[in-house]
Amino acid sequence: MAAQTMRLVLASNNAKKLSELQTLLTGLNVQLVPQAELGISEAPEPHCTFIENGLAKARHAAAAAGGPAIADDSGVCVQSLAGEPGVNSANFASVSLPSARKSPSDREARRRVQDAANNALLLQRLHGAADRRAYFVSTLVAVRHAADPEPLVAVGRWPGELLTEARGSQGFGYDPLMFIPDLGLTVAEMDADLKNLHSHRARAMARMLALLKDVWQL
């Protein structure tokens, strides 16, 4: 008898993040469902570390959905800024946006405005800086239920250098500024297949897949 497919709620409304994680989960007996499809609101992220925010988001989604959930808390950490923007990467710049509607297209339009402001602020903060080393961080947290005493945690880091101007039109967030020397491209110049092969999220997911298979027996 074939094993039953597990519904795994993604504690995010970011459509591009969903697409990346769906691709990375290919081959596993899992149906990834974004929390928005279940009417689950986004969780507060008051903590100063990726792991604490990831756990808060995963527990929130699991409690609302009544089952397993996974969260990705990620961002960019800049060497010369003592790790900033870090957990504040998504909302680094202060932007006045209209109230969100429920449609995915509206959320993505808001995200693009915020991303542009974030990139502009980061370039401003780094103006004239000689040290432009940075790295993307992805911390994945999975729980079987909201009170799971053994959350699965996997971290991936992807080092690069921040350019002085944006290049490329793929991806999202800080992708147009992050140059990966080994590949000779910014992340926004990579197609999805190349990005999913090398990214911080891919590195975290490789570790998470091993945990899901070993601990959850998927």
Image (spheres, helix red, strand yellow):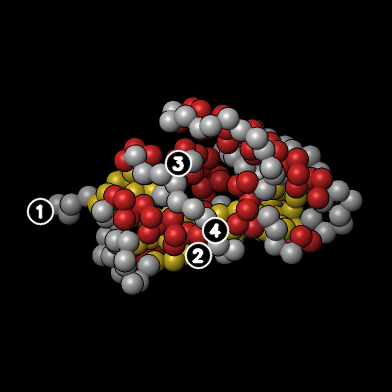
**What secondary structure is found at the residue carrying circle 2?**
helix
Q: Which residue is mark 3?
A: 13
Q: Nearer the viewer, residue 10 or 182?
A: 10
Which of discs 1 and 3 lies nearer the camera? The answer is 3
Q: Earlier in the sequence, mark 3 or mark 4?
A: 3
Q: Nearer the viewer, residue 61 or 83?
A: 61
Picture disc at residue 72? none
Q: Is residue 17 rendered to the left or right of residue 130?
A: left
Picture disc at residue 46? 4
The answer to whether any part of residue 176 appears in the image is: no
Which of discs 2 and 4 lies nearer the camera? The answer is 4
Q: Residues within 10 Å of mark 2 (few under 14, many from 20)?
A: some
Q: Amino acid at mark 1?
A: Met
3D distance between C-alphas at marks 1 and 3: 34 Å
**What secondary structure is found at the residue carrying circle 1?**
loop
Q: Which residue is mark 1?
A: 1
**What secondary structure is found at the residue carrying circle 3?**
loop
**Image coordinates for residue 74, horizontal then vertical, percent:** 56, 54
Numbered marks: total: 4
Q: Is residue 45 rendered to the left or right of residue 142?
A: right
